[in-house]
Amino acid sequence: MEFRSKLIATLRAIRPVLDVPGVLVVGSEVPNLVQPEAASTLVVSQDVDIAVPVESLAEVRDRLGSLSGLRRSNEEPSVWVPESPDLIEVNFVGMDRSIRDPSETYAIEDPDLPLLVFGPLGILVPAGRVPVEDLEVPVPSTASLLLEKLLTDRSAQKGARDLLVAAGLLSLLDHDGEQEFVRLYRTLPDEMRHDVRSNITVLSLMESLPGMPDPKPVRDRLAALLRLLECTEASSQ
């Protein structure tokens, strides 16, 4: 079964959760979903990340019993694993928009759906729903997800994956999205703005990997984005 079919089948299986206001599909699958006709050509990872607003945890938890073809992992209760080879894994993560410092991370010890709340997810801006066959999938704006990926502090393969996903997102960013990106960037603390610029530099030097977005076609845009951010820094001093 091709990856696109597995991805869409998994989204159908978790549709009750996707209908909860504020819930977003985030992470590496978003570039796949916003490709024309959700082409899903970038098999970056074999899972779907679902961001749950902390204020919606109870409603999401109440709908877990409606999920079909998935069960909670015994090892990681925030992960739901497929009972069929036709589905892929689903990871639930917490999102708290009240966090003022994106470096903040904390845990919610819920007996049914414990969540690790990642501070950078708090900067994500909902962008409506993307039509994918018979589904309407809630996703964040390209600009906010790009910024969240460029805030990665992960190393090795996971860090590289975040940055290559950022390359895919940058290729989808229009002029309005670029302005949104800069506006969100300005809200970050100094140290995190430095991290964003550093990760842009790292990404501009990376090579492509099989199944992942290729950074080479967007190197000019990366250079232009870095110059724009540096000008933003200079004008704020």
Image (spheres, rainbow, N blue to C red):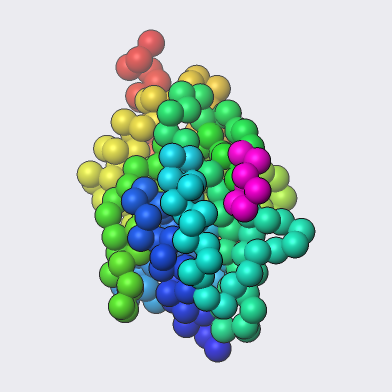
Tell me where residue 129 appears, x and y as whole percent. Answer: 29, 60
Q: Residue furthest bottom?
A: 1
Say which residue appears at 55% left-offset and 22% top-offset.
191
Q: Is any part of residue 171 visible from this angle?
A: no
Instruction: Point out the stretch of residues depicted in magenta.
Output: 108-114
Q: Vertical placement of 94 versus 237: above or below?
A: below
In this view, the residue farthest toward the right is: 75
The quadrant of the picture occupied by the C terminus is top left
Is residue 113 part of the magenta span, yes or no?
A: yes
Majority secondary structure of magenta residues:
loop
- Residue 87 is covered by the magenta coloring: no
Q: Is residue 90 left or right of residue 122?
A: right
Which residue is at 43% across, 28% downward? 98
* Vertical arrangement, residue 153 with respect to residue 87, above or below: above
Q: How far from the left and from the top, in percent, is residue 151?
A: 53, 38
Residue at the extreme left? 176
